Image: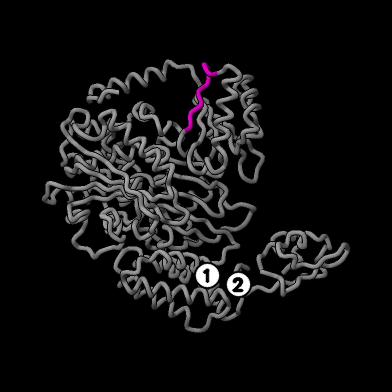
């Protein structure tokens, strides 16, 4: 493929669009993200291609492996395009029936269609499913629709149009101006205005400047950036080129964790294709502007999500933060002016340039513009990737898009902002998702991880879990984070073990204040948030653990004692058969008995008993 000029790019786009409009071929879009690969989408894809070939249908149907579709709970997924029929949880064994019934006879295979949680309602079309219908895809506009390994698919959907506009029709001041008008704030957690950051770097003197993309994404429960890279890598590259023009940079790095092999593979393919087409590298599109991108693989240290630690890591040093100022826009990578944004931020930039900053700012709230991508997981029916307008209430995300809590259990809390975020209770579910409102209720927006918890979650144990993560991931450079979080973890472990004592809660609060005010970087400064938010909203659970030696959620094993109520026991033996360590003695027509010496307090019997006889 010869390198394209800007005129060639426009002609290629028009050609691809015309071919698509004239084609009668139906596309079979198979989700090919990491989640669907894990549930068996590759055998489904192989079986589908073979069945279509064997039936002589290759002139009518085309199998396309897309990136992440977003509805992770339902994979492997197949969408018949342009009909929009949505098939879920497929296996290779389903393929012959699906081809015969739907593709040949034109009948839906009802058992494979989406069913609303808790009902028998079948919804055949993707856009009618509440999970999709209640979203507004912008950063995710191409998810599940294109082959991420084919640049033509991206170009046909206005790919690289924003880049061409920025290179040929806009000055750096124009680009920065439109990004500022858009109100786009960094989607990596801090929410700093993107246009302001770029303006600082543009005005910083120096012939060498860098554009960095943070694809480290270390929060438990977060998979937004990974999914975007797997589904739409060219959007990120295009956003980086536009940023490079804005600050006059000629070199960029994408810092991606090694645990993202599929994202790194597809990103590498996209870089090679972009260079081949003249969309990256020397003299981009004949504009005279040079910009190259390199992937740098990180080892998975959470602290390297902090911008200065990330830069030290790229330099070949230990990933540890440094004091600021000077800020990276003035003195960043190799002490040169540097901008760093995350994957989601860059993926929004091309559309801002194509449609204008005012278009982007027309959605959202006064201080938080545009849309936000969330990874919704935990105790929720519809686990997956969600993009909604800023200002959407948390309740809508969890119950309208997320489908509510499984098994008719009650909602208890939602952890927002990852391990540095906080737990928000039901009383605050109407809080809009915007930066300042989330901070007011004791959490942070973070990169967008949303972990839903039901009534069976112990909030003391949840605080312990996140503090264990923070302590493990602390780089150890500053004493408040290194030693303060360790001491908090020890206290929380003691409380969960039934050894809590008077004064522990006050000590946790005092330590939190010291750590927040004196830690060096954002990891330490926000590290106590899970402790503070759980104490703020679930203090009674801490008191129950400390003073009553009881875990209300029945999760902390050290505080549990198991007994069988002979009046309620139906003598069915279900608990005995389920016990993994044979700690329950049972004979036919006899009441079960628990051997407390063998019992490991795993709660299996408690969950399996249908009659409530184990307490």
Task: Please tell me in which quadrant of the rendered image residue 584 appears.
Answer: bottom right
Q: Report the residue that reaches farthest toward the right.
A: 589
Residue 175 or residue 41, whichever sits in front: 41
Q: Is residue 237 visible?
A: yes
- Could you tell whether 481 is left or right of 553 in the image? left
Residue 249 position, x and y percent, is 19, 43
Q: Is residue 27 left or right of residue 289?
A: right
Residue tagged 2: 551
Count up the numbered dots: 2
Regarding mark 1 in the picture, which secondary structure is present there?
Answer: helix
Q: Pointer 1 and pointer 2: residues touching (CB < 8 Å)?
A: yes
Q: What x and y, as percent, mark residue 338? A: 21, 51
Q: Residue at x 38, y 63 (%)?
A: 440
Cα distance in 3D space between marks 1 and 2: 9 Å
Q: Secondary structure at mark 2?
A: loop
Dominant secondary-structure state across the stretch colored magenta: strand
Q: Residue at x 36, y 71 (%)?
A: 481
Compared across the picture, whether 243 is left or right of 388 comes to left
Tell me residue 80's x, y (percent).
53, 27
* Residue 362 shows up from this direction: no
Q: Is residue 590 magenta?
A: no
Residue at figure coordinates x 59%, y 62% from the top left = 455
Is 368 displayed left or right of 115 in the figure?
A: left
Q: Which residues are magenta?
A: 58-65
In the image, residue 471 sits, relative to residue 85, either above or below, namely: below
Q: Residue at x 73, y 59 (%)?
A: 578
Disc 1: which residue: 460
Q: Which mark is residue 513?
A: none
The residue lying toward the viewer, choosing from 435 and 589, is 589
């Amino acid at each position: 493929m010869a390198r394209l000029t800007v005129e060639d790019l426009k002609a290629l786009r028009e050609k691809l669009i015309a071919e698509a409009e004239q084609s009668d071929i139906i596309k079979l879009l198979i989700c090919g993200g990491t989640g669907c690969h894990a549930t068996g989408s590759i055998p489904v894809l192989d079986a589908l291609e073979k069945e279509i070939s064997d039936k002589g249908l290759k002139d009518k149907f085309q199998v396309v492996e897309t990136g992440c579709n977003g509805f992770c709970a339902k994979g492997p997924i197949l969408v018949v395009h342009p009909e929009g029929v949505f098939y879920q949880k497929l296996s290779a064994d389903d393929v012959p029936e699906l081809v015969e019934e739907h593709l040949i006879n034109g009948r839906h295979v009802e058992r494979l269609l989406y069913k609303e949680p808790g009902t028998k309602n079948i919804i055949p079309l993707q856009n009618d499913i509440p999970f999709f219908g209640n979203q507004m895809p912008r950063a995710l506009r191409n998810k599940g629709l294109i082959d991420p390994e084919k640049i033509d698919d991206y170009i046909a959907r206005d790919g690289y149009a924003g880049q061409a506009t920025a290179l040929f029709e806009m000055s750096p001041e124009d680009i920065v101006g439109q990004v500022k008008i858009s109100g786009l704030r960094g989607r990596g957690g801090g929410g700093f205005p993107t246009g302001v950051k770029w303006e600082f770097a543009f005005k910083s003197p120096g012939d060498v400047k860098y554009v960095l993309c943070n694809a480290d994404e270390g929060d438990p429960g977060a998979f937004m950036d990974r999914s975007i890279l797997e589904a739409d890598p060219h959007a990120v590259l295009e956003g980086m080129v536009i940023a490079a023009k804005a600050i006059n940079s000629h070199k960029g790095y994408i810092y991606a964790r090694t645990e993202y092999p599929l994202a790194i593979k597809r990103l590498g393919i996209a870089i090679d294709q972009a260079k081949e087409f003249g969309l990256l590298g020397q003299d981009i599109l004949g504009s005279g502007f040079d910009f190259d991108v390199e992937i740098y693989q990180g080892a998975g240290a959470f602290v390297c999500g902090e911008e200065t630690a990330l830069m030290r890591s790229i330099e070949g040093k230990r990933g540890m933060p440094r004091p600021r100022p000077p800020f990276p826009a003035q003195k960043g990578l190799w002490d040169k002016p540097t901008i760093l944004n995350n994957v989601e931020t860059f993926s929004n930039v091309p559309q801002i340039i194509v449609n204008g900053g005012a278009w982007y700012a027309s959605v959202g709230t006064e201080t938080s513009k545009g849309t936000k991508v969330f990874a919704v997981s935990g105790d929720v029916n519809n686990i997956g990737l969600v993009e909604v307008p800023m200002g959407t209430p948390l309740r809508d995300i969890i119950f309208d898009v997320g489908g509510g809590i499984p098994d008719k259990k009650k909602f208890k809390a939602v952890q927002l902002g990852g391990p540095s975020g906080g737990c928000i209770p039901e009383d605050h579910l109407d809080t809009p998702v915007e930066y300042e409102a989330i901070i007011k209720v004791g959490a942070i927006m973070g990169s967008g991880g949303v972990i839903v918890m039901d009534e069976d979650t112990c909030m003391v144990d949840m605080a312990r879990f996140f503090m264990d993560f923070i302590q493990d991931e602390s780089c150890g450079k500053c004493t408040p984070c290194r030693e303060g979080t360790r001491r908090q973890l020890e206290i929380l472990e003691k409380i969960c073990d039934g050894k809590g004592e008077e004064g522990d809660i006050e000590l946790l609060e005092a330590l939190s204040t010291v750590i927040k005010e004196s830690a060096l970087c954002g990891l330490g400064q926000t590290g106590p948030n899970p402790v503070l938010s759980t104490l703020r909203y679930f203090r009674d659970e801490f008191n129950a653990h400390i003073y009553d030696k009881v875990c209300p959620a029945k999760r902390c094993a050290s505080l549990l004692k198991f007994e069988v109520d002979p009046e309620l026991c139906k003598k069915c033996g279900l608990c005995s058969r389920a016990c993994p360590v044979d700690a329950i003695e049972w004979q036919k027509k006899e009441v079960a008995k628990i051997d407390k010496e063998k019992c490991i307090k795993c709660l299996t019997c408690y969950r399996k008993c249908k009659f409530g006889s184990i307490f």
